[in-house]
Amino acid sequence: MIEIERKFLIVSDTYKKEAYKQTRIIQGFLNTHKERTVRIRIKGTEAFITVKGISNKEGTTRFEWEKEIPLAEAKMLLELCEPNRIEKIRYEVKIGSHFFEIDEFFGENEGLIMAEIELSEENEEFEKPDWLGKEVTGDVRYYNSQLSKIPYRNWGI
């Protein structure tokens, strides 16, 4: 129930050719407090409720609890969520012994493309593909909960 992950921006779309799966995701947040978030996610035809705790100082590690819930219930819970849902397509790519999840955002976050890799240890080595750009691990602006509050389009980049 401890999640260790690192986040990176993407510098090209060549990951799409390497993806073995892609899934549409819609998610909202029942709570976006900095010490805990409660997320409702519809991923394809599956639905989940997730609780995440506060990240460590580096932004790599935090508590995460997730449970699958009925799709109909998730749709009802999305109606109770805070404003500004997150919409994205997730591409899954295997590089070496690791899996990258690349999220291409839409709506108010269109233009943002970000990769995440989950690790077993904070300092675990992994192969970095050519399409992997700047690391943004620990930059709270890139947390989905924060993107729902201050969307990428509003950053003025």
Image (cartoon, rainbow, N blue to C red):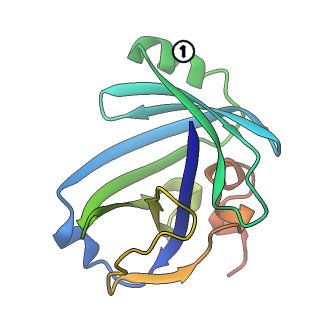
Farthest residue to the right: give it. 34
In this figure, which residue is indicated by the disc labeled 1? Answer: 76
Horizontally, residue 79 falls left or right of residue 133, namely right
Image height of 84 relative to 61, above or below? above
Please report the residue visible at 76 percent of the width from the left and 37 percent of the height from the top. Answer: 36
Question: Which quadrant is home to the N terminus?
Answer: top right
Instruction: Check disc 1: other Cα within 10 Å, few if <14, some if 14-19, many if 20+.
Output: few
**Rendering coords of residue 83 (x, y %):** 70, 37
Please report the residue visible at 59 percent of the width from the left and 43 percent of the height from the top. Answer: 2
Image height of 24 relative to 130, above or below? above
**Rendering coords of residue 150 (x, y %):** 74, 57
Q: Nearer the viewer, residue 39 or 112?
A: 39
Please report the residue visible at 67 percent of the width from the left and 82 percent of the height from the top. Answer: 157
Which element type, helix, strand or loop, lies under badge 1?
helix
Please report the residue visible at 35 percent of the width from the left and 82 percent of the height from the top. Answer: 131
**Rendering coords of residue 122 (x, y %):** 57, 64
Res 147 quadrant in image: bottom right
